[in-house]
Image: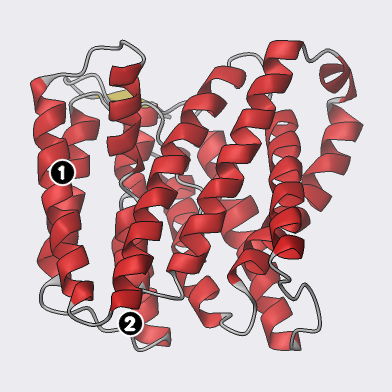
Amino acid sequence: MTSRTAGGTVRPVGADGLLLVVAIAAVSTSGPLIAAAAAVPALAIAFWRNALAGAVLVPAALLTRRHELRGLDRREGRLAVLAGALLALHFATWTPALGLTTVASATALVSTQPVWAALLATLRGEPVSRRVWTGIAVAMGGAVLLTGADLRVSGAALLGDLLAVLGGMSAAAYMTAGSEIRRSVSTTTYTALCYSLTALLLLAGCLAFRQQLGGYAAADWVKLLALTGGAQLLGHSLFNVVLRDLSPTTVSLTLLLEIPGAALLAAVFLGQRPSLLTLPGAALLVVGIALVIRAGGGGASIPVE
């Protein structure tokens, strides 16, 4: 059950609110789990989370959506391919970032995707208000502060920050493409196709860069399974469920809670204590993104960690 506020956004109540809490908790484990699986190459982590998710979703789509799969037209097929390629780019940039910078910084910077979505909307000729641009300016100020904080630590951390920003940009482009195909294609069919193609592209990257795809310790396989079952399947599936009742704006705003959630888990389990500069930087970033979303610029909004 949901209710609308005077500003036109939808406020989750009851079951939807509970599902959002569970989904946020699930996706918040993504960054810490990736950082904890340091023995597994970054591209291999990205490959396995998509391959394992595809191994669950493809049979489900074949059993329940076979008619829809056969009826896909060329436009839908091209959009699915584009979305899969963009998702692969997202994982190929954001996952390595977690090994170079802190979980808090990487999660905060990759969560700039609503900002990039607003910029993409402008390029597509959609109007963007002054309030949206104000939010973008505030968010970028936070990103600069976060980057400056890591720059004082090492050049590797700066590279990690830049990769996280690229991850946010590719996620925004991925969601823009996905929002088009999901107008006519079910979530099960779309995610089965997208994750499978993403896995194939990441597999090609692993082979090209000679990334080790097996022989990991049992504990690392447990982390990969937890990443797939939690962030990839449970988190994203629940977001798709609540999107039946809640606006993308509301979901985007609540997804920002992933930033403090991931930072808290990283502090407790990985010992990554945020610096004095990181905290105000992350705060500015959250405020800026919230301004963008509240002004109506966050339509393509679901993160893919």
Residue 144 in sight here: yes
Q: Residue at x 32, y 63 (%)?
A: 161
**Kind of residue at disc 1:** Gly
Q: Where does label 1 land, which residue?
A: 288
Q: Where does label 2 land, which residue?
A: 267
Q: Residue 69 appears at what percent x and percent y?
A: 84, 22
Crowd tier of the residue under label 1, counting other residues whose Cα lies within 10 Å: few below 14, some 14–19, many 20 or above: many
**Distance (Cα) linking label 2 and label 1:** 24 Å
Quarter of the image for residue 37 reads: bottom right
Q: Residue at x 49, y 57 (%)?
A: 93
Front residue of this view, candidates 172 and 9: 172
The residue tagged with tag 1: helix, strand or loop?
A: helix
Front residue of this view, candidates 150 and 231: 150
Instruction: Tell me: 161 left or right of 279.
Output: right
The residue most toward the front is 208
Residue 258 in sight here: no
Front residue of this view, candidates 119 and 190: 119
Q: Residue 2 appears at what percent x and percent y?
A: 38, 28
Instruction: Tell me: 152 left or right of 174.
Output: left
In the displayed structure, 30 sits above or below 182; it is below
Instruction: Tell me: 123 left or right of 303.
Output: left
Q: Residue at x 40, y 58 (%)?
A: 163
**Kind of residue at disc 2:** Ala
Q: Residue 273 appears at what percent x and percent y?
A: 26, 84
Quarter of the image for residue 125 reads: top left
